[in-house]
């Protein structure tokens, strides 16, 4: 399996950029998720990789083979890239084995070789027992696994997955996420997975590219996106919590700053000496009878094993977790523990941003 590289790739629709100068490298065998709000360009980047779209600018390479670059363009059928769609796209009149075998028949592979490769793909996707069933006799998750097996049987150099779990219910999505992870570990395939569901992206991928308005805002491991977001968009889009402007930063030691936030001077983590914002995750804001910050509960929702509290404090909206239910209007004391700061001069210096739940 090969690595994918995007150099300064742009795509315009009617003069409006759907992709705007994408630079990214996806390593051989890496599982990468493209995450972002609707319309940010995730599907366009995937379609461009598959060869269904031609970039207006830039170069796409797979394992050092140029797929698209100015005048040169490799058509989809010659890229050897597998694609799994949300809609499964199975042949209804063919059996599971027949569906999986089809790409090999088209390539003129011999019957014995086809049988061997189909058996291997069915085994990898846990479908051996369903080989003779028709797609109509399968659940949604099983159909999606047939689509995955059919894509893999051709031994693609990379696998692209476009919101493959969007049509499944929550329980099945969880089971399929585990199936994808197990599958990736067994095959070592290079996988690019499009989703607007951050839980799915953070759970599955080695690295996540967070996109907004046709650009990649940050491309990092899930834990780094959550713990060390580089700008207000990523801090607000990934994970829960609040993003607040900071004042009067000073740097006592490398990796640390003292900042003024919520009326307190506190120590925060930082890679910059001049932070403009702080990202406060719920676990960094603790209910603490001795805490210096006062907050009023404005919402309380049960999240299974804990309550999520929304609080108004110093003109900002904060999020924390509590083991017991709180009432709207309760006044709580809070303390803040080593949040992460970053420099994002393009964001408004005074407007607090509430992160996504
Ligand atoms: N064929 C097209 N013609 C014109 N505009 C398009 C076309 N395809 C996509 N766009 C526009 O390009 C932008 C990026 O679309 P894209 O489908 O890549 O977004 P996305 O991040 O995949 O969104 P979603 O999560 O809703 O699928 C959007 O503004 C969209 O309206």
Image (tube, rainbow, N blue to C red):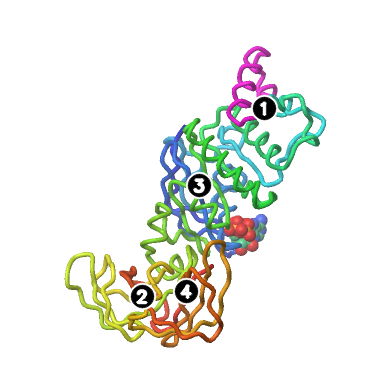
Q: Residue 317 appears at what percent x and percent y? A: 47, 80
Q: Residue at x 55, y 31 (%)?
A: 156
| Mark 1 or 3, nearer chain start | 1
- The vertical placement of 82 against 237, above or below, is above
Query: Which quadrant of the figure shows ligand 1?
Result: bottom right
Q: Which residue carries the number 4 mark?
A: 319
Mark 1 to mark 2 CA distance (whole Å):
52 Å
Mark 3 to mark 2 CA distance (whole Å):
29 Å
Foreground residue among 278 and 325? 325
- The vertical placement of 181 against 255, above or below, is above
Would residue 277 be visible to someone looking at this image?
A: yes
Q: Which residue carries the number 2 mark?
A: 277
Q: Quadrant of residue 78?
A: top right
Q: Residue 162 appears at what percent x and percent y? A: 61, 47
Mark 2 to mark 4 CA distance (whole Å):
16 Å
- Residue stretch in magenta: 103-128
Secondary element at tag 2: strand
Checking the image for residue 204, the label placed there is 3
Q: Quadrant of residue 152?
A: top right
| Mark 2 or 4, nearer chain start | 2
The quadrant of the image that shows the C terminus is bottom right
Q: Is mark 2 within 8 Å of ligand 1?
A: no
Secondary element at tag 3: helix
Q: Is mark 1 within 8 Å of ligand 1?
A: no
């Amino acid at each position: 399996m090969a690595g994918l590289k995007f150099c300064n790739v742009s795509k315009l629709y009617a003069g409006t950029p759907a992709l705007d100068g994408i630079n990214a490298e996806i390593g051989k065998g890496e599982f990468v998720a493209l995450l972002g709000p609707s319309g940010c360009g995730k599907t366009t980047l995937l379609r461009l990789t598959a060869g269904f779209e031609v970039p207006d600018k830039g170069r796409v390479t797979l394992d050092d083979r140029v797929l698209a670059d100015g005048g040169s363009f490799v058509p989809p059928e010659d890229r050897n890239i597998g694609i799994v769609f949300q809609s499964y796209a199975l042949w209804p009149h063919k059996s599971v084995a027949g569906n999986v075998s089809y790409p090999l028949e088209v390539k003129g592979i011999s019957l014995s070789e086809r049988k061997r490769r189909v058996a291997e793909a069915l085994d990898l996707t846990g479908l051996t027992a369903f080989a003779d069933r028709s797609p109509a006799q399968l659940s949604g998750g099983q159909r999606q696994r047939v689509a995955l097996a059919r894509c893999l049987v051709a031994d693609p150099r990379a696998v692209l997955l476009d919101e493959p779990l969007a049509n499944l219910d929550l329980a099945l999505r969880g089971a399929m996420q585990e199936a994808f992870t197990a599958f990736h570990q067994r095959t070592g395939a290079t996988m690019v997975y499009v989703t607007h569901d951050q839980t799915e992206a953070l759970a599955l991928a080695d690295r996540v590219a967070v996109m907004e308005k046709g650009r990649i805002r940050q491309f990092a491991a899930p834990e780094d996106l959550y713990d060390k977001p580089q700008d207000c968009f990523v801090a607000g889009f990934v994970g829960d919590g609040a993003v607040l402007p900071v004042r009067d930063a000073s740097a006592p030691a490398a990796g640390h700053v003292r900042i003024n936030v919520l009326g307190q001077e506190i120590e925060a983590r930082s890679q910059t000496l001049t932070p403009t914002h702080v990202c406060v995750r719920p676990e960094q804001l603790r209910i603490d009878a001795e805490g210096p910050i006062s907050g009023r509960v404005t919402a309380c929702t049960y999240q299974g094993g804990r309550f999520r509290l929304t609080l108004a404090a110093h003109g900002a909206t904060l999020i924390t977790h509590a083991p017991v239910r709180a009432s709207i209007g309760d006044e709580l004391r809070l303390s803040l523990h080593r949040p992460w700061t970053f420099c994002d001069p393009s964001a408004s210096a005074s407007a607090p941003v509430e992160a996504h739940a």
